[in-house]
Image (cartoon, rainbow, N blue to C red):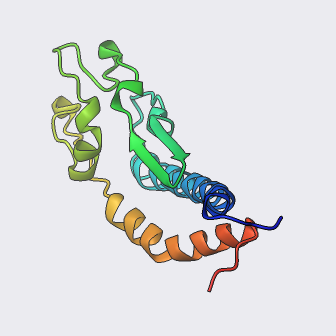
Amino acid sequence: MAISSDAEFYVVVGKAVSKAIDEVIERVFSELQKAIERDIYNGYSPQDYDRTMALLTAWKHEASGLFGDVEFQPSMLPLDPANFHHSSPYGWDIRSEIFDILEGGYGAYNAKLGKPIPSRPMWDEFIAKVDAKFDKWMRAALRRQGLVVI
């Protein structure tokens, strides 16, 4: 297709770049899910707690035009106070703070038995990995859309 105006250029290149951004956002989201699985869920396995696994899917991830976003959505986490899923029978809704709690550890859960929840940091490693690979991912995604990347 021959491009004959600035508007056509932006339409053609904009679509290709938007598709590339969408591909990279999906890659970032996939890496995020792997980090949560590895560092949060596999980092500590209590015997007396049934996990919801909802931290893997409580995210909005989208690309729109020339913008992409992966955003935690605490409201997508289920509230089940009786089973201490993101809340408690005492009225604490911790969905918005869940990653801070997991990152730092928490001593109150099952404190009667002396089993504190250990810290499970993941963000620094995840961000470093994405930072190190983002340029490569973006260049490859742009090439897959037929764009020449220097």
Which residue is rendered at x = 42% and y = 26% of the image? 76
23 relative to 92 in the view: left or right: right
Q: Is 60 above or below relative to 145?
A: above
Task: Tell me where residue 108 appears, x and y as whole percent.
Answer: 16, 34
Which residue is rendered at x = 31% and y = 26% of the image? 86
Which residue is rendered at x = 57% and y = 58% of the image? 21
| Quarter assignment of residue 4 | bottom right
Using the image as rendered, state which of residue 58 and residue 82 is in the foreground.
Answer: 58
Using the image as rendered, state which of residue 96 and residue 122 is in the foreground.
Answer: 96
Which residue is rendered at x = 52% and y = 75% of the image? 135
116 relative to 63 in the view: left or right: left
Give the residue furthest to the bottom: 150
Task: Tell me where residue 27 appears, x and y as whole percent.
Answer: 59, 57
Using the image as rendered, state which of residue 64 and residue 45 is in the foreground.
Answer: 64
User: Does the rendering let one see residue 106?
Assistant: yes
| Quadrant of the snapshot with the C terminus | bottom right
Q: Is 26 above or below relative to 75?
A: below
| Quarter assignment of residue 3 | bottom right
